[in-house]
Image: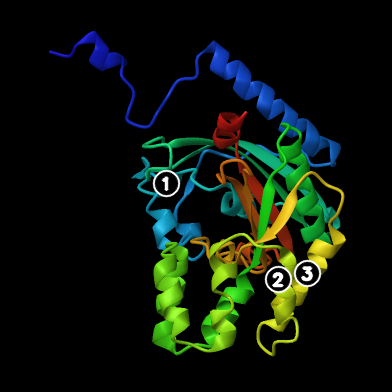
Amino acid sequence: MTTISTRLSLPAGARVLMPAESSRRRSLESRIVTELQRGDYAEIILPVLDFVDPYRDVIPDDRSRQSYRFMDRNGDLVGIRSDFTPLAARALSRALTASDLPLRIFYRGEVIRTGRNRLGPNRELFQIGSELLGVPAPDGDVEILRMAAAAVGSTGLRPIIALSDVAIVSEMIGMLEPSTGLSLRDALSEKRFDTVEALLRKESAELHELIDLLVTANPVSELGRFVAHPVLGGSARRILAVTQAVSGFPADLALQLDAGVSPHSYYTGLQFQVISPATRQLIGSGGRYDELYGRFGFDCPAVGFTLNVDDLEELL
């Protein structure tokens, strides 16, 4: 016989926000949204459901496995929203024309994932994301970094923004034997830094110099050592150019190359993490994905970020 307590229980990882919690959430959300609107970013509302097939070549398998999927009444495989960025790209690509660019948008809501996060088996994550379409690097990168810093700054926090570039790690891996390069990529993406150090110690002195940059946040100026490097120089100069253009905003910049190794396959250039200075807790992330919209039929440069409102709320 089903008891009342069983009937009223929620699935593991689902939750209800009571009045006081709801009030805190809405207050925090309002501050961030006000800052985005001040920067001329307009809200779009994205669906909770979409077909799975259009994303097969966009979202890597490890992230796809974190989404809830089911067959609808027509026999189509449908997924519940687990990542805003590809969803926004598919939705907007069908509606945009070149005359709509540049476009500044933001969105908010829950993403639902099957995997555990650092808080435990919480499956509902409330996020606010922002995108700038039609503005290439470095101008778009500078604007989105300012916007991310201002959004977090509106809550009273001064975050660390750890910068990287997808190309740096790819170029470095290309300097290694193929099997070593694959091992290094896996170790970086899984943050097994002892393995990273062991792999690089066997390689050239210049790669060994990168160990500290790969595993800890360092001053961006440290990258200056590599601006003349025949392989790594281009990426180093791009990051330094962006950081020199960004000043006077409520964040501290750091360099952390492992921030550029992501399970998201759609990033193409700048990538960054937004980190709490007190706890070193990840509270958001972002980067450039110039090829993503083209995969859905509308080529345009794009850069954006997402803030994890639950994690921000915990710090206040």
Q: Which mark is residue 109?
A: none
Q: Is residue 121 above or below residue 23?
A: below
| Residue 14 in the figure: left or right of residue 105 | left
Instruction: List the residue tagged with mark 3.
Output: 240
| Residue 298 location, quadrant | bottom right
Callout 1: SS:
strand
Distance from the alpha carbon under mark 1 to that under mark 3: 42 Å
| Residue 212 in the figure: left or right of residue 187 | right
**Which quadrant, please, contains the N terminus?**
top left
Instruction: Work out which residue is located at the far left of the displayed protein and give it.
Output: 1
| Residue 227 in the figure: left or right of residue 286 | right
Q: Residues within 10 Å of mark 3 (few under 14, many from 20)?
A: some
Instruction: Work out which residue is located at the far top of the displayed protein and give it.
Output: 4
Callouts 1 and 2 close, C-beta under 8 Å: no
Kindly identify the residue that appears in the image at 44 percent across and 72 percent down: 196
Q: Which mark is residue 222?
A: 2
| Residue 93 location, quadrant | bottom right
Distance from the alpha carbon under mark 1 to that under mark 2: 46 Å
Callout 3: SS:
helix
Instruction: List the residue tagged with mark 1.
Output: 78
Callout 2: SS:
helix
User: x, y (%) of residue 106?
Assistant: 71, 42
* Closer to the eye: label 1 or 3: 3
Amino acid type at circle 2 is Glu
> Can residue 47 be seen at all in this image of the molecule?
yes
Q: In front: 277, or 99?
A: 277
Q: Is residue 47 above or below residue 245?
A: above
